[in-house]
Amino acid sequence: MELIKPGIKIPFTRYRFIAVAISSVINLMVLVLLFTKGPLLGVDFAGGTVAQLKFTKPVTIPEVRNALGELGAGDTVIQDFGQQGSNEFLVRMQRTSVQLGELGEQIKAGLTRQFGSGGFEVRRIESVGPKVGSELRQKGAWSVIAATVMMGIYIWLRFELRFGLGAVVALIHDVLVTIGALIIANYEFDLTIVAALLTVVGYSVNDTVIVCDRVRENMRKVKRESLENIINTSINETLSRTIITTGTAILVLLALFMLGGGVIRPFAFALLVGFFSGVYSTIFIASPVVLMWEKRAAAKKS
Amino acid sequence: MRQSVLTRASLFAIAILAAIIYLVPTFVHPLPSWWTSFLPADRINLGLDLQGGSHLVLGVKVDKAIENNIERIKGELTNVMREKGASGVSVERVEGNLLQVRVAAASVERVRGILKSDFAYLVEAKTPQTVSGNTDFYLTLNKEELRSLRDYAVDQSLETIRNRIDQFGVSEPIIQREGQENILIQLPGIQDPERAKEIIGKTALLEFKLVDDTANVEDAIKNGPPPGRQLVYGHVGRGDSVGAEKQAYVLESRALMTGEYVQDARVRPAQQLQGASVELILNGPGARLFEQITAANVKRRLAIVLDNRVYSAPVIQERIGGGRASITGNFSIQEARDLSIVLRAGALPAPVEILEERTVGPSLGSDSIRQGVISFVVGASLVIIFMLVYYRGAGLLADVALMFHILFLLAILAAFKAVLTMPGIAGIVLIAGMAVDANVLINERIREELHAGRTPRSAVEAGFQHAMPAIIDTNVTTFLSGVILFQFGTGPIKGFAVTLCIGILTTVITAVYMTRVYYDYRAVAGKLKHISI
């Protein structure tokens, strides 16, 4: 079976200006979103407490809020969690149990008054102090930046500087698109999201590697062709493997996203978006950057 | 060629056998005894998020420990100066770690000498100033002393907490230092995290102080205690009604004895009118000291102070020998038991605060495992079917390689006693989708070479050869991001990074080298005339 027939010739590089323009606008919008609405930070980064509750009978959010009494007031967020009809809720509050062990006991006491001691279960409770949160936030951001730069350096060493630059720009695009999608889908940013972003960086660059590898090979084979044509041929020749390698990863991610449960869903979502974006950016971002760099260098020379 | 195929095939056979042996302990419980005597018994352990339990990060307030030390040095300075005949010297702690030593003009040289000989670990924070005939020295701890005090405070806290947890009874706890001032604690399968936290977090500084009955308590509350005295409130036990009035005491600030002399602490069950109490058994020197103290203060009240709360303040009726004292406080039997644990394990050198806490109940863990296994089975099946449909024979080969990859990945995790977390499971699922990438690259290349008119045998040869650089580069980049993630990550995230990195190694081995053995075998056997791809 063949999804993409050999000998296919799509003039990808011809669409590069419109693609770069659209991507720039999207990235700019993500940046605006990032600094206006901002990411929804989970307790890992914002500090605070999150409790996952499961009830034996159907209950409503107002009932839970009521039962929590004073704890349910203020900026406490209560939302449905898990599958439909599993009667699970996530309770988020800004405060942490600075007083040893108090918060968990208070939650239990409130719920016991309302629902009886057998009527609910505290399945998970996580508290992170504000200091730890801000430290993790910084470390997380730096690790994503470091990974991106490292990929660029690796490509530079293995291929050429201009390919390294193209890869870095493409990766920045992928990370921004993923972040934007997470913000729009209202998923919380926590440690697993950082793990997802780093994986996106490490995996999206693969498509760029495959294309670069072919460009290098083709440059040795045909000397007289323009770089634009070589890149275009290379993209076309590697198109089916770019799509299939990412496609198999997407298959397992879909399974994780739908069946993996509430904890892993945002993680799978981020990878799905990032991997899709990775294929797109290899074709429409990395290659144009290489070409533009080439044109600028040529203009400088003359 | 024939020889090389045979060698490689046998190597893989041995590796597969070893992998199966390493995986048996993970899936077979209990292991037969003959197994454990000469075969590996290590297995993949479940992380806290999968088996349930508590993960705590404590911050040791080392600054507090250093402040306490500065107070102690202050006392020592005063004493040594007096003993060595330097008169007109007064020592104050001005702020934080800064000591001010005020010296009359006549003693300046002598004090300088004593500081140099007896207090070498103190350095001058700023140049001495002369104010109306007196010289003020400003001293603080030198860097080495500061560092060793910090280290001591954290290490000592770690030891004490380890003692407490051991006595509390948790199986396979992990207690280790994290970073400069933090302590990481993992308590698998714990049922009552609140109680554990209370036991871990109590400073448990036990002091015996005399009650100053001449001082007026009301006055002290209003205007602050007189010099050398302090105002301390009484303990309100769990049995007491909420809002019970706390009694205030005026105590002499100097502690006559502290908890370091406690050898053992036992619970005494409740008696008619009282709740349970805790009996302290002092060690030899402690018993002698306690005898001296009680002998010298008959008819006075001795307050037993724990973490700045007065638990009881009985009147000393007579000299008490034998080294026994008891703390009463209307305790429930559990409170008394917990208190005896912390007293036995000793005091923390500095207070601790909980920086991070993650507790997962056992039911959530088993749900997560189920969801992880289901998504793995579904995801891997989708990939296997896709490869089979898309590449037929070559797809089947890739699928077999994928199965061996999973076998190797799990075996290596077991051999390293790796901890499997939910993100780790997600990593295994994800890697299943990435594992066939190398096969895709090789197969696509073989197809290309076939289109170019090569024979199957030379197309396979060229396909492997030309796909190799891209396979190496793509795997190196993903591996690098896994390494960065490992550096950054905590707990569960590290589990993901580990599976990602190990998985990349095993995919290269199975997807490239194993499939190559198969093609080479066919080539040697003269059966590589057709290729299903």
Image (tube, coloured by chain):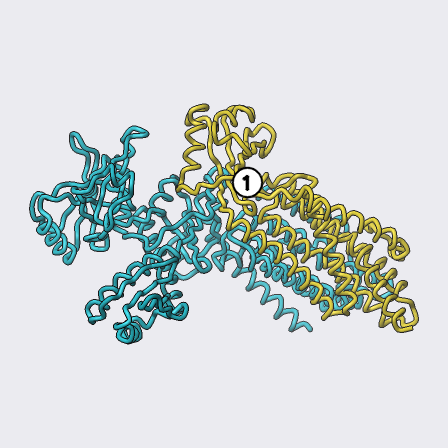
- Left or right of B34? Residue A233 is right
Q: Which chain is cyan?
A: B
Towards the viewer: B211 or A30: B211
| Whole-percent x, y for residue B173 in the image | 39, 51
Q: Is mark 1 on a helix, strand or loop?
A: helix
- Left or right of B343? Residue A222 is right
Please name the amino acid that badge 1 sits on.
Arg
> Badge 1, how many Cα within 10 Å: few under 14, some, many 20+?
some
Residue at horizontal 55 percent and vertical 64 percent from the top = B14
Q: In this view, does B505 lie above or below A23?
A: below
Residue B224: quarter of image: top left
Is residue B308 visible to us here?
yes
Towards the viewer: A123 or A233: A123
* Quadrant (top left/top right/bottom left/bottom right) for the C terminus of chain A: bottom right
Residue at horizontal 27 percent and vertical 63 percent from the top = B90
Could you tell me how many numbered marks the image carries? Answer: 1
Residue picked out by circle 1: B370
Q: In this view, does B200 lie above or below B404?
A: above
Instruction: Report in which chain the residue with disc 1 lies.
Output: B
| Whole-percent x, y for residue A12 in the image | 87, 55
Q: Which chain is yellow?
A: A
| Whole-percent x, y for residue A68 in the image | 48, 28
Towards the viewer: B487 or A206: B487
Is residue B533 visible to us here?
no
| Whole-percent x, y for residue A262 in the image | 59, 39
Residue farthest to the front, as pictured = B132
Residue B445: quarter of image: bottom right
Towards the viewer: B297 or B103: B103
- Left or right of B1? Residue B158 is left
